[in-house]
Image: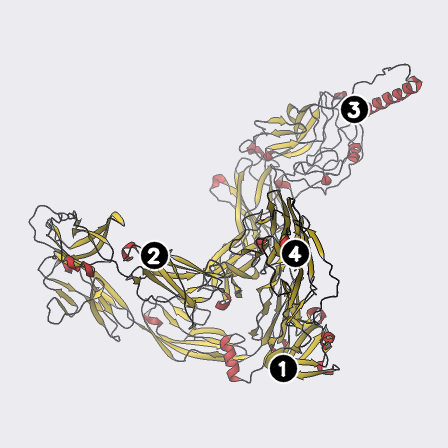
Amino acid sequence: MVVALRYLKGAWAPTFPPVITEQSPRRLVVFPTDDISLKCEASGKPEVQFRWTRDGVHFKPKEELGVTVYQSLHSGSFTITGNNSNFAQRFQGIYRCFASNKLGTAMSHEIRLMAEGAPKWPKETVKPVEVEEGESVVLPCNPPPSAEPLRIYWMNSKILHIKQDERVTMGQNGNLYFANVLTSDNHSDYICHAHFPGTRTIIQKEPIDLRVKATNSMIDRKPRLLFPTNSSSHLVALQGQPLVLECIAEGFPTPTIKWLRPSGPMPADRVTYQNHNKTLQLLKVGEEDDGEYRCLAENSLGSARHAYYVTVEAAPYWLHKPQSHLYGPGETARLDCQVQGRPQPEVTWRINGIPVEELAKDQKYRIQRGALILSNVQPSDTMVTQCEARNRHGLLLANAYIYVVQLPAKILTADNQTYMAVQGSTAYLLCKAFGAPVPSVQLDEDGTTVLQDERFFPYANGTLGIRDLQANDTGRYFCLAANDQNNVTIVANLKVKDATQITQGPRSAIEKKGSRVTFTCQASFDPSLQPSITWRGDGRDLQELGDSDKYFIEDGRLVIHSLDYSDQGNYSCVASTELDVVESRAQLLVVGKPGLTYLGSPGPVPRLVLSDLHLLTQSQVRVSWSPAEDHNAPIEKYDIEFEDKEMAPEKWYSLGKVPGNQTSTTLKLSPYVHYTFRVTAINKYGPGEPSPVSETVVTPEAAPEKNPMDVKGEGNETTNMVITWKPLRWMDWNAPQVQYRVQWRPQGTRGPWQEQIVSDPFLVVSNTSTFVPYEIKVQAVNSQGKGPEPQVTIGYSGEDYPQAIPELEGIEILNSSAVLVKWRPVDLAQVKGHLRGYNVTYWREGSQRKHSKRHIHKDHVVVPANTTSVILSGLRPYSSYHLEVQAFNGRGSGPASEFTFSTPEGVPGHPEALHLECQSNTSLLLRWQPPLSHNGVLTGYVLSYHPLDEGGKGQLSFNLRDPELRTHNLTDLSPHLRYRFQLQATTKEGPGEAIVREGGTMALSGISDFGNISATAGENYSVVSWVPKEGQCNFRFHILFKALGEEKGGASLSPQYVSYNQSSYTQWDLQPDTDYEIHLFKERMFRHQMAVKTNGTGRVRLPPAGFATEGWFIGFVSAIILLLLVLLILCFIKRSKGGKYSVKDKEDTQVDSEARPMKDETFGEYSDNEEKAFGSSQPSLNGDIKPLGSDDSLADYGGSVDVQFNEDGSFIGQYSGKKEKEAAGGNDSSGATSPINPAVALE
């Protein structure tokens, strides 16, 4: 859009919305001698008109009486001059400037004007202060209040400052505190002076006469705080501002003050102690400084303390400040306004200075998560918006305009450009376009779209890339850029040439010393290109050397004459054109004369001699040695090493290598090194044994010859820069010690260098601005002088968190589980550091049908800084996702741009819990649960099945179009065949993953068998568990618990309807320490019986009450009372035993099952068919017990049972001797979940 703006300015007469360019500060204090000047400047075309408000009411300064107003032309600024010193009092208030033209209205921040009069000290009578020696005293100051900070001084009548120390201190409030007075404090002229910087006035208080009575016995006393006087206080500190805490104590001897922070150490880099430790100042307060601070006053007799509880709050500050933008018609405009503060600021929006609450409700804007969004903008939507955030500590305001312009499409790339490339390479055809609305770019090859070929890939900037070029890609390519204004086209010509190929490359060779070798190279080239064949040896270009006949190069041949060991290496043939380069490599090995039996590394160098020792003053020495045995493999080189026994004993360093035919060399040495030499011969088999060591020689000291390498400057905090470098090796010190001269200055300035000499390889430069480039030099220094002039390195002070918010261009749905996210590159000036990349965070908020309340798992992708798009894959279909994109630097991540998107429908997951229930010898009932992952809107199910022994033949498949269906009855099945059943859920995208079960009818399953059944018990429950028989068809049965040992044969709980496949059942509400019989029934037939006893102490049975006489004095009245008590107890026992009772009576005393604690649970596979159980019983495990429907009842459970069932197999009747009406409740209750029967949460 920058290009578009330039085009707009150059093509048409520009019009721009108003932009405030200058305004008065938020707080303006006017003193009696000052004029009132309020500033408001703005740019914009057409010409901007200005207006003011004061305290929200329209204000015209020229209409004010008794003042003179100077109004600037084409400006909103004005100056008011009064005719008396108090005229400014009339104009106090909150001012705001509005700048308008036909494109909108910009607004200044609030300007609070305060008028302050001449300061005067109130009249008072100052009485002498009399105190005994050793006591404490406070001399008050109490200066007049002022809008500006004051400076307080205590002086005497001779204008000399009162000396302050640990005993005598002036507090932040201006009072003068004496911890204990001495006779030397006896003066009559203690004067408090108050300096008012705004009025440039100093006024003084009446002198205070301090009279100290001498005493012969000063009484010691423990400390007591003079300020603050209470034990604790609460303070609010503003983030980024300094925090000042003060403790002043009295006592004798004079107390000392210590400061403590119980929650952790004081931030040493930001805390200072002043006023003899009585004042703690913490700079740049942050959230981490929240908490308790303690001051401790101590002397030899004791201590006193005060606790400051500091709460850190913050005025509003920007996370993302809205920015002005140009838009094309039809685009969506979004202005993000994100602020932070403590407490959280309230954010309001205005449009053209009018609060959005006062605008008509039919406006097309919407406010979403702090952003103002306008869709399908048109030129009439041009406006200036204001985002305002405030809390009790301050206010923020940002003006940002939405300027909707129409620009015709334009292509900046030149027309009819020709591009050349070779086959197999990649070509890039440029087409850079812009316009408003943003033009669409279409790429064609002679009228045919090119995007059908996967080798063609367009870029967002209009560039067309073509990979793996072929000869038939030669041709003309058209780029069409179009918007609603116009369309333009350019042509690009692509010519694909034959790639250069080496048809015959050089071959590796092993040749004898003194012989010659010939390498040949042949290559094919495109006939229209200029060919070239060159040779390289070990990476350097080879050329014929004048008079030397060493190399001969002609017609693709390289001949090397008089081979020596130094000629060994890699030789390359390089074939090239102006479009491509190819290379083929061969290896040459030179060997000596054959015939010796031993092959291996050389023998030791037998002798080593140092000569020309007089050259040591020039840091040189000559080393000579006798040749080593080569062991029939030519010596390639000699390695000369040295050891410094002083600095690095037993560690050898290489000084260099010389050719194998050389037996002496003059070495360049470093100053101040204790050299001991040795020489080692090396051939193709490796190094031999080293020579004997030489004598030790020492070179003289000298100034450094090198400076440190790897000089870097980067901050580890926002306000510093840490300069580091790689320290010099000791052998480069040139003296016993070395230091470093570090110089730095801001880049681009011509000012003097700041410098510091250090010994450590780092230096911390403090109090820098955030992310500012610096020029840095590091120079080595020793006792002999400085090193060479160092090179300048550019470093940066510390980074801050980025303020840039990536602007999302859009999200392209690729398929139901993948999207392409694109965003615009961020403004590097807002990154506040080196842009390292982008963090893309996304998480699933739920399906499109409902949002999830479960824990949110967030996925993260890190995108390189030069990339502005990413593909997110593995997404859940038919889901809502939240996306955040953040730029990050070395400090951390900046504010996020947020976006939500939804994935389209996909195929569902497999259905859950498919079960087969036998109905008869030829029918099965299938029960299932819907998929956990719908991935869309379920449209039904597909059921398929076939006999297993027929190899899949005869498969039947049909659609079940009811998505709410949970059961299906299959009939006409063979009673002697096993079947494979396959069930798939479907959405509009088709069937999903299948769940498969195998089974047969009742005839195949045989007689129902409970297998290994057992029962365990707790205090008030019992668990019945069994092992389902393999291949056994699922069925349902009843479990009945009957208590034993009670009167009239025992009491029974309501029977429960249980599924065979669930393997266990838990019965609650049993009596402790009670024997129970457990009966199992299936289809009115008794199947199994067992016994269990619960734990605990059982029911409490009260013994019969008796009457015991305590004495005749109790009397007749006591006997009557005891008799009544006995009768009440007997009635209670009778009622508690109760015998048989009706289910209805028990229901009336129970809490409804839906309101009871969730102990018993509905079995998961039947959770969609929930019914309300008997009022007195727990909810049934599968929810299929129906309400009582007849007056029939079960006989008392003795030797025989008369049990009746409904058609679906559920019990009817009640376990009592009475007939009751149908139990209330209906079929609307549901069981709770349990560990053996998890409820399935469907989305």
Height in image: 204 above or below 1051?
Answer: below
Q: Main secondary structure of the magenta part?
A: loop
Mark 2 residue type:
Pro
Residue 1023 visible in the displayed image: yes
* Left or right of residue 817, residue 1206 in this image: right
Mark 3 residue type:
Lys
Q: For the residues carrying marks 1 and 2, which lies nearer the camera in this image?
A: 2
Q: Position of residue 710 (x, y in %)?
A: 35, 60
Mark 4 residue type:
Asn
Label 1 sits on residue: 75
Choose top left, top right, bottom left or bottom right for residue 898.
bottom right
Q: Which one is earlier in the sequence, the residue at label 4 or at label 3?
A: 4
* Left or right of residue 1033, residue 88 in this image: right
Residue 588 visible in the displayed image: no
Report how far apart the C-alphas of labels 1 and 3 lie in the structure.
99 Å
Q: Position of residue 464 (x, y in %)?
A: 41, 71
Q: Do residues under tags 1 and 2 come within 8 Å of each other at their CB atoms? A: no
In reply to whether residue 1230 is colored magenta, the answer given is: yes
Assign a secondary structure to mark 3.
helix
Height in image: 916 above or below 478?
Answer: above
Mark 1 residue type:
Ser
Label 2 sits on residue: 727
Q: Which residues are magenta?
A: 1225-1231
